[in-house]
Image: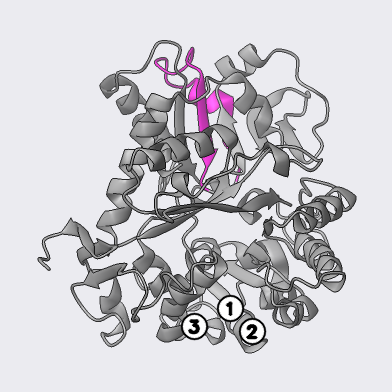
Amino acid sequence: MWGWASQLPLRGSQTIGEILSKIRIYIETTSLEPGAWIEGQGWDQTLWGGAFPTAADLDKDPLLSDKPIVLARTDVHAYWVSNEVIRRLGPLPDKVDGGEIIRDADGNPTGIFLDNAMALIDNAKPQWTDAQRLRFFRRTVKDALSVGLTTIHDAATYVPDIEFFKKMATEGKLPLRLYLMGHVISDTYWGAQLPNITAAESADGRLMLRAVKIFADGALGSWGSALLEPYSDRPDTTGILRSTPEVLRSLIADFYKNGWQVNTHCIGDRTNKIVLDAYEEALKDSTDKGRRLRIEHAQILTQEDLKRMGRLGVIASVQPTHATSDMGYAETRLGPERIKGAYAWRTLIENGATVTTGSDFPVEGINPLLGFYAAVTRLAPDGTSPHGPGGWYPEQRMTRHEALRGMTAHAAYASFQEDKVGRIAKGLRADVTVLSRDIMTVRANEILGAVVAATIIDGRVVYGGLKL
């Protein structure tokens, strides 16, 4: 998805006008395939006042007014589309379970589609070809290796993409490791639909598929994370539960029973509670305690569930830059009490949870040093926070060793690869990132100045000029 998002990147845009300008430049400088839609990613309405943009905003530029345009929000839990897209969709349903079509006072769609309503767009727009997949993959690999990544956990791999990666692995064209989390949009067990990856297709262990990804709710920035109580800044909603509690319990039980590692997207405290309940039920009746269930994000939890994560042995797969990206509005959304259980990494660690520290790119930047810096400082890259230079809720910071472990040894454990990678030790694969400075000892404000001197995978330099 990073390669796809890099076609028309919108992250950091401060105004709607700036986005319109970027789209215009993209159209004028890009040779699009016949019938292609214009797709971009990264807008964030909190950067220009908080109100969602509209299809009418895109019509302000005559060059854009008749174009099919789909722009994913930075969290990829909302689409902003043009009136041409709305026209092509035809009659829209009044209601979408697990999603929402935002409408104006007259009941007309404004151009914003949230969570499960995004499937209406996905089903209508042209599907990726393998040529596009290859182009996106090459861009992702190029950027990943340049920032020192040796393994990517792909958190929602659809069946056509799994088949593409299998082909690349068989042809010896996987320059790094891919840990896939299979995903199919369905409320009934879909494990049998996922392709099997044989030993011959695994490219000597570079391609793995033993996990599934379930989406339980939306995202905080689009008021989609499912909360136990209404949003503080929007008392009319508690967010979006993308599947019913009964469906989530059934899916988790079935996947667990069939031997899969279950990784569930949970942002809000309601969703984390529902999924932890389901995990606890699955673990209670199982003799296999080594399935390494994961919660992706583990972003907002009650104090009791922060303790339960550690007690159950559930892996908290967090993304430190989510805290620093959200800190400008998170407390407005949650209020002064709920915020104490949000982005609470120190509390999770002290309660015994295994914490991994990923990036969630393209939702955030691809450089893992951004996450390392956010984890240990709770500051934006420019050194600021709503609480000043000491960091946003600094009592929840990680130590440098905890942040590094989350990206290396714990990430390997979370993907069943601790006997292969994640540490520098005799008998393990030589996957190594060499930086220009020691991020464990330099001053905090110098961490982001480190650059990758070399990326080494299986003992071979795949990026940089280091000679072995």
Is 278 displayed left or right of 417 in the figure?
A: right
Three-letter code for the amino acid on which mark 3 is drawn: Met
At x 78% / y 24%, what residue is drawn? 107
| Picture quadrant where residue 99 is located | top right
| Amino acid type indicated by mark 2 | Thr
Find disc 3 in the rendering and name its residue: 398
Q: Is the C-beta separation of discs 3 and 1 under 8 Å?
A: yes
**Circle nearer the N terminus (3, 2):** 2
Q: Position of residue 219 (x, y in %)?
A: 65, 52
Res. 327 in view? no
Magenta residue check for 163: no
Q: Which residue is painted at 39% across and 16% down in the image? A: 63
Q: Quadrant of the C terminus?
A: bottom left
**138 in relation to 202, above or below:** above
Q: Is residue 241 visible?
A: yes
**Residue where numbered disc 2 is placed:** 347
Labelled disc at residue 345: 1
Element type at marker 1?
helix
